[in-house]
Image (spheres, rainbow, N blue to C red):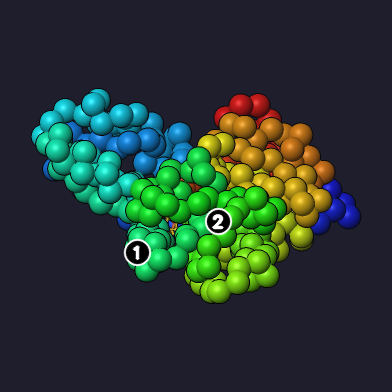
Amino acid sequence: MSAAGEPKPTIEVAEGSGVCFGVKRALRLAEKALEAGEAVYCLGPLIHNPQEVDRLAGRGFRVIESLEEAASGGTLLVRSHGLAPAVVAEAKALGLHIIDATCPLVRRVQTLATDLEGDGYQVIVAGDAAHPEVRAIQGHAPKAVVVSAPEALEGLALAGRVALVAQTTFSPEVFRRMAAELVMRVADEVRVVKTICAATVERQRATASLADRVDVMFVIGGRNSANTNRLAELCAACDVPTYHVEVADEVRPEMVAGRPRVGVAAGASTPQWIIDAVRERIRALQSGRGQGNL
Ligand code: SF4
């Protein structure tokens, strides 16, 4: 029961929170391959969520750092971030069967980058050079340059025809500024293809809107998940106390004390079972249960 004069405790989850269709598809393909009893490998974590990776590992799914770790005859699942063609070719040469779980939206960026480079454009990828999705895009367009901020365009010698594409989870606002900068600087032609994932944009919009009307925000997802970190940054920018948690146990009583309206958002790789557990933990604290660890 709420104290006199205090609003009733609520928990609201931002629209579009949790696993996106690209990650859902990759998980479905992974489960299917495991059911077939195959040895299934993945170069790097299938999704940026340690708890879900552990759950799959319990079923025999193996995350590897290099192809040499995979036994010939096994299956390599290409995660939603995609892989460079040279890596896929190497895997096939090593006798691995390929299941391609590249998200169709990521595949579109790869195809565009290849085609634009083939048509003579200098391709610029707005993104994080260290992110696996971006490395895979560069594998499809080896001359492409990766730029993470408009200021970084200043140091580039730009060709007569330039094409700009984006990592699917890139900030729309920074992308717009990059496009404007290129239009100012390139003499002949600038092609801008907005390849940012609509689900990501919508999740960010819904999260910021929720953060504006609650007393505290919990952003759930792997600390290695770029899109979850971005959601936490957006909430913090709304001047609301924000906690980035991976699991329910991290929600402490003091985080919700005196903050009746609770908002929850989750990144594109956060499974529903973790979101449910965090909600249950918050509900328990709001009702005076769960003062210690769950
Ligand atoms: S966030 Fe968007 S682009 Fe990335 S895997 Fe999910 S649906 Fe695909």
Mark 2 is on which residue type? Ala
For ligand 1, give the image quadrant: bottom left
Q: Is residue 83 visible?
A: yes
Mark 2 element type:
strand
Rounded to the nearest whole Å, what is the CA distance between mark 2 and mark 1? Answer: 19 Å
Residue appearing at x 45%, y 34% in the figure: 50
Quadrant assignment, res 121: bottom left
Task: Give the labeled residue for mark 1.
Answer: 118
In the image, residue 161 sits, relative to residue 29, either above or below, namely below
Q: Is residue 274 above or below residue 235?
A: above
Left or right? Give the position of 45 relative to 247: left
Residue 148 percent across, percent down from the top left? 60, 50
Q: Is residue 34 left or right of residue 155?
A: left
Residue closer to the observer: 102 or 205 = 102
Note whether 189 is above or below 224 in the view shown: below
Residue 247 placement, left or right of 91 = right
Looking at the image, which residue is at 61% across and 27% down? 293
Q: Amino acid at mark 1?
A: Gly
Q: Residue at x 77, y 51 (%)?
A: 237
List the residue tagged with mark 2: 126
Residue at the far right: name it: 5
x then y, percent, for residue 269: 46, 47
Residue 203 lies, with reference to residue 43, above or below; the image says: below
How many residues crowd mark 2 within 10 Å: few (<14), some (14–19), many (20+)?
Answer: many
Horizontal and vertical percent for residue 135?
42, 45
Q: Secondary structure at mark 1?
A: helix
- In the image, what residue occupies the spot 45% across and 49% down? 134
